[in-house]
Image (spheres, coloured by chain):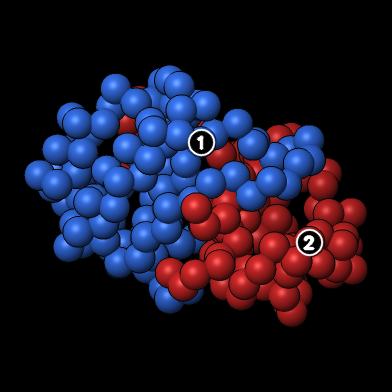
Chain colours: A red, B blue
Amino acid sequence: MSENHFIHHVYFWLNNPDSVEDKSSLVEGLKKVTKVKTIKTFHIGKPAGTNRDVIDTSYAISWLLTFDAKEDEASYQTDPIHLKFVEECKYLWKKVVVYDTVDL
Amino acid sequence: MSENHFIHHVYFWLNNPDSVEDKSSLVEGLKKVTKVKTIKTFHIGKPAGTNRDVIDTSYAISWLLTFDAKEDEASYQTDPIHLKFVEECKYLWKKVVVYDTVDL
């Protein structure tokens, strides 16, 4: 990857993890968030099916974003598209864990 | 990102989190691992300095790999370069959490 990346990786655990509809609602919501202009790359994913002691396989959806700069991620946090998503979709999740990472 | 990604995101917590030397040893070890041929992209990072309730800022080093296919990641797991790294550097960490993610 190029220099000066800001990596924002979010893992979602759902209130109804077995609900195909709820998972689909979250994914559709995230797809709308991809329109935020400061996002450089995005990936929406699910657990890979691997299974070792150190692997956390319990989340439902992975949301991986990269930004060119820290300021772009800060802008994303308050972007109306992002805020609307949180407001409309927050009933779906019971837990969210975020890891923000920058270059060494 | 392109289709058919396999995303392997590892977070390391160190036995001596305040040791600059230990952190450096881990990073040098990871740099050697980047030579594994099945890796598509890699990123070695540290916490971004952001701080909200949902953000886990407690890890020391983030190791983000992407692969073109699940088989490439499986091959990476048993690659001699990777195994040598684990053997030589495992004394450095007290906890490792891995999230493996594929396309929906």
Residue B84 x/y as whole percent: 14, 38
- Front tag of 2 and 1: 1
User: Is residue B79 at least partly visible in the picture?
Assistant: yes
Q: Is residue B17 above or below residue A69?
A: above
Please indicate whether residue B21 sits to the left or right of residue B52 in the image.
left
Q: Quadrant of residue B24?
A: top left
x 56%, y 67%: residue = A4
Residue A5 x/y as whole percent: 56, 65
Any mark on residue A74, and which? Answer: 2
Q: Identify the chain of the residue marked 2, using the numbered disc in the image.
A: A
Q: Is residue A33 above or below residue A27?
A: below
x 18%, y 29%: residue = B87
Q: Amino acid at mark 1?
A: Ala
Q: Quadrant of residue A30?
A: bottom right
Please indicate whether residue A8 sits to the left or right of residue B97 in the image.
right
For the residue pair A23 and A98, the one nearer the viewer reads as A98
For the residue pair A29 and A53, the one nearer the viewer reads as A53
Residue B47 x/y as whole percent: 59, 44
Q: CA distance from mark 2 to mark 1?
A: 22 Å
